[in-house]
Image (cartoon, coloured by chain):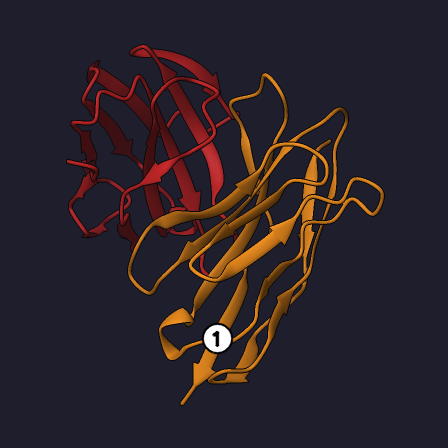
Chain colours: A orange, B red
Amino acid sequence: GDSVTQMEGPVTLSEEAFLTINCTYTATGYPSLFWYVQYPGEGLQLLLKATKADDKGSNKGFEATYRKETTSFHLEKGSVQVSDSAVYFCALKAQGNNDMRFGAGTRLTVKP
Amino acid sequence: DTEVTQTPKHLVMGMTNKKSLKCEQHMGHRAMYWYKQKAKKPPELMFVYSYEKLSINESVPSRFSPECPNSSLLNLHLHALQPEDSALYLCASSLQPGVEKLFFGSGTQLSVL
């Protein structure tokens, strides 16, 4: 079935460091891909999305590009801040499907 | 109002108790979802309501009983739970079924003793 695999954490970075969180997917057809973020004590929030191959989603300095050839949707940010500390979930939704499938989550801690 | 509100935020219950979790949104969304999230794990889909009708039940045990009394409210009735049911229960909504942007509440942290 459809699934998402993302890099295990936790990831600890210093402020202003470059961030990459890897995500690969397995799906039939052409799913939509997402990154959600969960801050401590809160529910998940949509960070960015891409709905077709070569689309780039971006928000708050974060970017991810839908790569069909490598079935990947890696999350990047050029300069992280302490306020970016959270758990990041990669997710996919197949066409015509109501089921959003999440990866295991990657905890990011940014130190001043 | 762009919020999904869940109550209570924390709940402790015994295995013989009956309790209910509540979820409310006033964004006019017609799809509502219950997810279960164990510690350090991703959310797992439990139920989906589309236009107030149950459309997906992911083989959830009958001790969890969802209810959607109107388009703004979603309940999850709990009865005879087990300690392994302890988790964060998240409610989400979307404008339409299949629309990709989910709005999540902050969850109810449930502990079953």
Q: Is residue A93 left or right of B101 when viewed as pictured?
A: right
The residue at the point 85 percent across, 42 percent down is A69
Where on the picture, by quarter, is residue A105?
bottom right
**Residue A89 place in picture, x, y as percent:** 53, 53
Q: Is residue B87 visible?
A: yes
Q: Where is residue B88 in the image (x, y as percent from the top left)?
A: 35, 50
Q: Which amino acid does label 1 sit on?
A: Val
Mark 1 burial class by Cα count in 10 Å: few <14, some 14-19, many 20+: many
Residue drawn 51% across the image and 68% down it: A107
* Disc 1 chain ID: A
List x then y, in percent, for residue A97. Answer: 57, 20
The residue nearer to you, when weighing B53 against A89, is A89
Residue sitting at x 28%, y 22%: B29
Residue corresponding to mark 1? A80
Residue A104 visible? The answer is: no
Dot 1 falls on a residue whose secondary structure is loop
For the C terminus of chain B, the image quarter is bottom left
Horizontal side of residue A59 vs B31, given as left or right: right
Name the spot of residue A52 as percent of width and height, x first.
Answer: 67, 32
Q: Residue A102 is drawn in which quadrant?
A: top right
Is residue B57 positioned above or below B19 on the image? above
Location of residue B34 (image quadrant): top left
